[in-house]
Image (cartoon, rainbow, N blue to C red):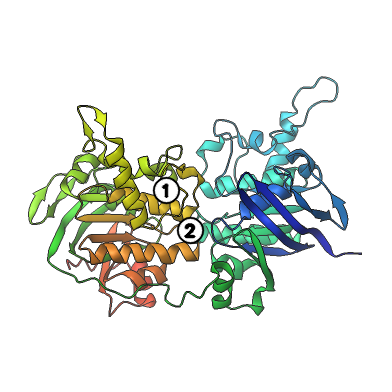
């Protein structure tokens, strides 16, 4: 008798013109947390949809506890104890937690068909408590944090008696503390008999949880290893298909004269006494623990929100940042942390997204010059190496890394001096990260002043010429690249002593 609760053999899934899965294999043991890794576009999403019955494979076999199975729809998979929790939580924000947990399998009286609310609320509370959560099952789903919504999604899976749970990038939008809570819940599920497929880009997730790792690349199965048997370098080669010997590019930028100077700006309740300078050709890292106020400072410098005291100078001229359009006209651009909600129009083509900030300049008497627009979009898409068939492809069809490249290209249509990048590599794989680092380095080499917000210590240390550390809305330290270490940054991020230095 097999000890695999789930086994896929030679699964192939084709769409018109695309082979999304090409002869892939996968084996999941009972009571195992098995990491699945691969770059964006490796086939992981299609793999989930095959297991959960959303897609039917063109060829190959799937076995559940040694028995061959075929799913025609997601209900089939649910009945067999398979559930998926997706990166972008899909829920009903205006309904209660209980309603979200039991959506589609409500408890009803066999004769009157009335919903048994008392029983459902009680069971929802019991499941949440078993997960170590004190969420009130009667409150609206929309009032919960992303981390709490993830817990509700897990509770929903448990309510369907799921024994195989697929978690798709569950830590992508979580803080370190929230991720640790999710790790504990995941281990609790494993200890209670569930088998878990944990999909992630983050090596720390794999090392913290998994005993086994499988890698897909270009829709193909590359291999499976015990987590203790494979090194980071070998894992990167498996995922990317080549060695990335230099993750961070060699510095080519020359730091020049002062571009931007921020003097004692503050916003009540968010940040205070923020002072720093940014020079031409400089990459200025901005880091700190979640909640330090980094994004709020950057948004105020782009006119999304306003600072209520202090001054900002651009090329020695005092400026007023009323709104984003004013900021861009003055020469400041901003790439939001959430590219899908704030950075791109997903249902538009690549080209139109890129040229969006310059539509006014590309128009004459209200008529858009399509030829000129396409030429600019094509040039900028090539400049940042967007991988697509044409600039008319929908942005929603791209991988996360390529979507991020489009968002960067969009900034380059405007005449900018300062570019603010908020978590520019969030949610992208190791290969795409390396490409984005090259782009950022090239921007600095061309003379742009770059402010890069990041929570990733290697990224901050590997890319920055100087590093600003924030804590609870204040700058605690500004470090030169030569003196910066992980220990010094962490100490400053947790320090209450303010060393507000203007560099």
Q: Residue at x 92, y 64 (%)?
A: 1
Residue 4 badge: none
Q: Nearer the viewer, mark 1 or mark 2?
A: 2
Q: Residue 502 at what x, y percent from top left?
A: 17, 66
Q: CA distance from mark 1 to mark 2?
A: 12 Å
Residue identifier under label 2: 428
Q: Which residue is mark 1?
A: 338
Identity of the residue drawn at 24% across and 37% down: 362
Question: In terms of depth relative to the viewer, which is nearer, 252 or 259?
Answer: 252
- Specify the farthest residue to the front: 371
Q: Is residue 194 left or right of residue 470?
A: right
Left or right of 401: which side holds 351?
left
Say which element carries label 1: loop
Please tell me how crowded label 2 is: few (under 14), some (14-19), or many (20+) other residues with Cα within 10 Å: many
Q: Nearer the viewer, residue 220 or 372?
A: 372
Answer with mark 1 or mark 2, whichever residue precedes in sequence. 1
Where is residue 32? Give x, y as percent.
74, 64
Question: How many neighbours does mark 1 have within 10 angstroms: few (below 14), some (14-19), or many (20 or more)?
Answer: some
Residue 349 visible in rendering: yes
Q: Residue furthest top?
A: 112
Q: Between residue 68 and residue 287, name the one nearer to us.
A: 68
């Amino acid at each position: 008798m097999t000890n695999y609760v789930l086994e896929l053999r030679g699964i192939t899934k084709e769409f018109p013109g695309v082979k999304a899965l090409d002869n892939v294999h996968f084996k999941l043991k009972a009571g195992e947390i098995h990491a699945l890794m691969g770059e964006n576009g490796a086939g992981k999403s299609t793999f989930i949809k095959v297991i959960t019955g959303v897609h039917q494979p063109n060829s190959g076999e799937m076995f559940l506890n040694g028995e061959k199975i075929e799913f025609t729809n997601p209900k089939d998979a649910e009945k067999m104890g398979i559930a998926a929790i997706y990166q972008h939580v899909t829920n009903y924000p205006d309904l209660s937690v209980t309603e979200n947990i039991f959506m589609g399998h409500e408890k009803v009286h066999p004769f009157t068909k009335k919903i048994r609310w008392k029983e459902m609320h009680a069971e929802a509370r019991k499941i949440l408590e078993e997960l170590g959560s004190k969420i009130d099952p009667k409150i609206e789903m929309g009032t919960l944090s992303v981390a709490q919504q993830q817990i509700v999604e897990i509770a929903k899976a448990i309510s369907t008696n799921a024994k195989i749970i697929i978690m798709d990038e569950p830590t992508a939008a979580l803080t370190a503390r929230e991720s640790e809570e999710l790790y504990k819940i995941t281990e609790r599920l494993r200890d209670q008999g569930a088998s878990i497929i944990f999909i992630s880009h983050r090596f720390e997730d794999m090392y913290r949880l998994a005993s086994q790792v499988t890698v897909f690349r270009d829709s193909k199965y590359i291999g499976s290893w015990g987590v203790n048997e494979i090194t980071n370098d070998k894992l990167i080669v498996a995922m990317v298909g080549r060695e990335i010997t230099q993750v961070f590019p060699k510095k080519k930028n020359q730091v020049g004269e002062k571009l931007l100077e921020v003097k004692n700006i503050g916003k009540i309740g968010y940040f205070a006494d923020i002072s720093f300078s940014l020079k031409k050709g400089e990459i200025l890292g901005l880091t700190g623990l979640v909640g330090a106020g980094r994004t709020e400072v950057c948004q105020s410098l782009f006119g999304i929100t306003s600072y209520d005291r202090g001054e900002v100078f651009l090329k020695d001229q005092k400026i007023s940042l009323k709104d984003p359009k004013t900021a861009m006209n003055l020469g400041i651009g901003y790439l939001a942390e959430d590219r899908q909600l704030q950075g791109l129009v997903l249902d538009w083509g690549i080209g139109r997204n890129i040229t969006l900030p310059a539509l006014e300049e590309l128009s004459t008497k209200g008529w858009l010059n399509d030829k000129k627009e396409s030429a600019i979009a094509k040039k900028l898409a090539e400049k940042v190496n967007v991988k697509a068939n044409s600039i008319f492809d929908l942005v929603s069809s791209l991988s996360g890394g390529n979507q991020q490249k489009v968002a960067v290209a969009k900034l380059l249509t405007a005449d900018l001096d300062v570019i603010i990048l908020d978590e520019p590599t969030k949610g992208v794989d190791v290969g795409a990260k390396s490409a984005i680092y090259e782009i950022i380095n090239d921007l600095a080499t061309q003379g742009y002043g770059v402010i890069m917000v990041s929570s990733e210590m290697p990224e901050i240390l590997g890319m920055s010429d100087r590093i600003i550390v924030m804590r609870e809305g204040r700058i605690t330290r500004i470090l030169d690249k030569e003196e910066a270490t992980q220990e010094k940054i962490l100490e400053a991020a947790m320090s209450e002593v303010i060393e507000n230095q203007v560099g």
